[in-house]
C-alpha cells in the first residue's frame, strides 16, 4: 500500500521540526573535513511546489513554515538559507524536502543515499537530484536498503528514517530496523521521525527504544494542540540516537519559541528529554 504522498503535507509543523533537527546534525558533521554519508530511508520527492493541486488542497504549510518569519529566527539562518535557495523570487513558492535540504549541506567529499518506494516520487526525486553527482536515488524499500548499505564507507554519517506510518507495522519495523542498523554502525547518528496520532503507539515506540540496548537517545517533540482520540496528527517528534553534544541545548532554546509560534491552542506542548543516557 503506497497511498501516502508527502506533497499533501509539505512544510507543515512536523516538517519544520524534522528539518531543523536534520540540519543541526549535518552542521555538526561538517565540522570535520572527513567525509560523511547521509542516508534517507524514506526520501519523498525532494522538492514541492506549494501551488500544486496536492499542496493547495490541505495548505498545511500555512500552519508550519509560513508562520516562521526569517527575521525573527536568526538562529535558523541555515534553514532559511536552504529554503531561499529554492525561492529566488523571495516569496515562499517551493518547499524543499529532506533530500534537497541535506544535499545543500553536503561537501564534495560527502554522499547522499536516497530511498523512495513510490514510483512517481522516486521519479521526481531522480529529476530533482540528477545534476548532483553526490546523490544516489534508489527506488527500493528504505528499511531493507539501509541494512545493505551499513556501515558506510566513510564510517560517519546521519540516517534519517521518516516513514509515513500508513502501515501500522511501520512502528515496530522502525525499531527493529534501527536495532539491526546500530549493530552494523553503532557510531552513526540516527534521526527517527514519528507522528502523534494515537499516543499509545508512541508510548510503545518509546518503550521499545528504551529497552533496545541502544545508548544515547534523545527525544524532541512538538504538539500544536493536546493529544486527542479524534483522528489527525496533533504532535510529532524526532528520536535522535548519538546526537551532537550541543543538540539538546539548541533544542531546549528552540522548542519553546517554536511552540509560541506554531501552537494551535492552549493545549500545545513540547518535550525535550533524554530517553537513554550515553
Ligand atoms: C514522510 S514522507 C518523506 C518526507 C521526506 N523525508 C521529507 O522530509 O521531505 C515518506 C515517504 O516514504 C515513502 N515510502 C513509503 N514506504 C517506503 C519504504 N518502505 N521505503 C522507501 N520509501 C517509502 C513514501 O512514498 C513517502 O514519499
Image (cartoon, grey):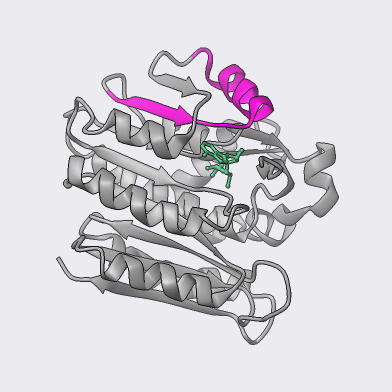
Q: Which residues are magenta?
A: 110-131
Classify the position of the C terminus by image quarter.
bottom left
Residue at (75, 41) in percent of width and height: 50
Tell me if I can see residue 127 in this picture. yes
User: Compared with residue 147, is residue 221 higher up or lower down, i.e. above or below?
Assistant: below
In reply to whether residue 100 is colored magenta, the answer given is no
Does residue 58 appear left or right of residue 145 in this picture?
right
**Image point 68% across, 55% down: which residue?**
66
Q: Position of residue 75 (x, y in %)?
A: 42, 57
Residue 242: quadrant of the picture: bottom left
Give me the residue at 53% from left, 14% from top.
Answer: 130
Asked if residue 121 is among those painted magenta in the image, a careful observer would answer: yes
In-front residue for pair 147/135:
147
Q: Is residue 40 visible?
A: no
Image height of 12 relative to 220, above or below: above
Return the residue nearer the eye: 45 or 68: 45
Amino acid at each position: 500500500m503506497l497511498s501516502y504522498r508527502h506533497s499533501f503535507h509539505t512544510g507543515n509543523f512536523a516538517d519544520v521540526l524534522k528539518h531543523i533537527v536534520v540540519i543541526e546534525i549535518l552542521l555538526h558533521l561538517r565540522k570535520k573535513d572527513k567525509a560523511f554519508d547521509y542516508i534517507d530511508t524514506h526520501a519523498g520527492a525532494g522538492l514541492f511546489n506549494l501551488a500544486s493541486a496536492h499542496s493547495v488542497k490541505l495548505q498545511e504549510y500555512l500552519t508550519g513554515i509560513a508562520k516562521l518569519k526569517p527575521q525573527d529566527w536568526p538562529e535558523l539562518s541555515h534553514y532559511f538559507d536552504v529554503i531561499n535557495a529554492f525561492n529566488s523570487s523571495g516569496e515562499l513558492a517551493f518547499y524543499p524536502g529532506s533530500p534537497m535540504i541535506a544535499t545543500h549541506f553536503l561537501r564534495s567529499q560527502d554522499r547522499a543515499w536516497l530511498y523512495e518506494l513510490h514510483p512517481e516520487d522516486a521519479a521526481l526525486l531522480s529529476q530533482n537530484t540528477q545534476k548532483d553527482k553526490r546523490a544516489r536515488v534508489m527506488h527500493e524499500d528504505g528499511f531493507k536498503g539501509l541494512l545493505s548499505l551499513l556501515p558506510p564507507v566513510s564510517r560517519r554519517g546521519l540516517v534519517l528514517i521518516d516513514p509515513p506510518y500508513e502501515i501500522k507495522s511501520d512502528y515496530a519495523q522502525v525499531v527493529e530496523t534501527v536495532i539491526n542498523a546500530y549493530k552494523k554502525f553503532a557510531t552513526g547518528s540516527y534521526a527517527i521521525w514519528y507522528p502523534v496520532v494515537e499516543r499509545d503507539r508512541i508510548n510503545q515506540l518509546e518503550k521499545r527504544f528504551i529497552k533496545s540496548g541502544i545508548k544515547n537517545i534523545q527525544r524532541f517533540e512538538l504538539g500544536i494542540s493536546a493529544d486527542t482520540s479524534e483522528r489527525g496528527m496533533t504532535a510529532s517528534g524526532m528520536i535522535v540516537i548519538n546526537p551532537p553534544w550541543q543538540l539538546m541545548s539548541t533544542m531546549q532554546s528552540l522548542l519553546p519559541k517554536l511552540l509560541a509560534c506554531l501552537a494551535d491552542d492552549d493545549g500545545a506542548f513540547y518535550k525535550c528529554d533524554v530517553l537513554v543516557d550515553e
